[in-house]
Amino acid sequence: VLSRDGKVLSFNKSAGKLLSCSLELGEHFITLLPFSEGKDAVLSSLKGEDGEAVFTVKGRVIELSAYHSGSGAVVLMRDISEKSERDRMRREFTANVSHELKTPITTIMGFSELMKDSSLPSDKVVEFSAEINKEALRLKDTVSDIISLSSLDEGKLGEKKNINLSSSVKEEVDKLKNKAQQMEVTVKWEVDPALTVRGWERTLSEVLSNLLDNAIRYNRKGGEVFIKGERAGKDAKITVSDTGIGIPEEAISRIFERFYRVDKSRSRESGGTGLGLSIVKNGVERMEGSVKAESRLGKGTTFIVKLPLGRES
Ligand code: ADP
């Protein structure tokens, strides 16, 4: 609370903390504000017109609202760092989504334009339609990953259930059997048949399928994937290991970010969207579990997922 001439009449502990200084009664408040935006807002409130400003103090984003009150002013400050980080991430995501959607659309437009030419030889027609089909599939995969992520973000997933892990793993392995065969990768699994986890079937299926799909796609010819499911204390521990290309140490901390790829062209060529691991991390965390990756370049990668055990009825 400020007097008519802008001196501090009263304050709470957080005010000093937010401004990273030791506030004293009787001090001129505006001299403590780091940026002119804040000073202007406070000065205008003292003159009778409410003011607002946003500024940064030691890396924290502060939103200041100054209201004229009596003969002085009341200044409210809020630390909005988390909110502004969320907003930044949302803006970045939107920009990335637009880019990821635009690239295949541009290719589809280019090839379909060429195909309008009636004198195009039939082998070119076949080649261009294959390109169009590939890009359309990429669009479909990207859109369905975005939908998965946004339903995880929304958090409307319904009631959690006990899910038998071994059946879920078997189902996902069956779905990707052909892909593994095409890539000449052997998939083996071993899951305690009595093991259940607490969560949502669809989310668990997305977690397992993304990890397994990556373990196959980033593998080598003749390589192996091994999935293990066991009890580890209060958790179910799922390990997905492969004998593939591995991940460089400096990239490990970034692979769970949306649209991050170590090798863009390999990801694209193999049908990646750049969203698989962010779906895994988001899904696992929604189920109150954790995920981490360990890798040796050129040797292989292991993802370790921990999920709460199913409840006993
Ligand atoms: P993508 O669709 O590109 O595979 P993901 O989010 O699933 O996207 O993975 C992010 C990146 O992490 C991949 O582009 C790849 O570089 C790396 N990656 C993920 N899983 C593996 C793996 N099992 N082995 C090697 N690299 C991997």
Image: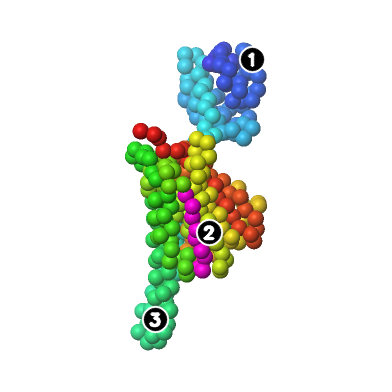
Seen in the picture, residue 22 relative to 290 is either above or below; the reply is: above
Residue situated in front as seen by the camera: 22 or 283: 283
User: What residue lies at 52% left-to-right and 32% top-to-bottom?
Assistant: 80
Taking depth in this image into account, of 293 and 184 the one nearest to the observer is 184
Q: Name the residue rendered at 46%, 47% in the picture.
A: 192
- Real-space CA distance between mark 3 and mark 2, rounded to the nearest whole angstrom: 38 Å
Label 1 Cα crowd, 10 Å radius (few <14 / some 14-19 / many 20+): some
Q: Is residue 49 above or below residue 191?
A: above
What's the residue type where badge 1 is placed? Glu
Looking at marks 2 and 1 on the same chain, the residue that comes earlier in the sequence is marked by 1
What residue did someone put label 2 on? 225
Could you say where residue 177 lies in the image, as x and y percent from the top left? 43, 63
Q: Is residue 205 above or below residue 79?
A: below
Q: Residue 239, image x and y in percent?
A: 53, 49
Residue 161: percent from the left, percent from the top? 36, 40
Q: In this orientation, does residue 206 appear?
A: no
Q: Which residue bears the numbered disc 3? A: 125
Q: Which residue range is magenta in the image?
A: 183-191
Asked if residue 152 lies in the magenta stretch, the reply is no
Q: Quadrant of residue 242?
A: bottom right
Instruction: Say which residue label 1 marks.
Output: 24
Q: Position of residue 290 (x, y in %)?
A: 52, 41
Q: CA distance from mark 1 to mark 3?
A: 78 Å
Main secondary-structure element of the magenta-colored stretch: strand
21 up-or-down from 188: above or below: above
Of labels 1 and 3, earlier in sequence is 1
Q: Earlier in the sequence, mark 3 or mark 2?
A: 3
Choose mark 2 or mark 1, whichever is in front. 2
Q: Residue furthest front?
A: 193
Q: Determine the CA span between mark 2 and mark 1.
A: 64 Å
Q: Amino acid at mark 3?
A: Val
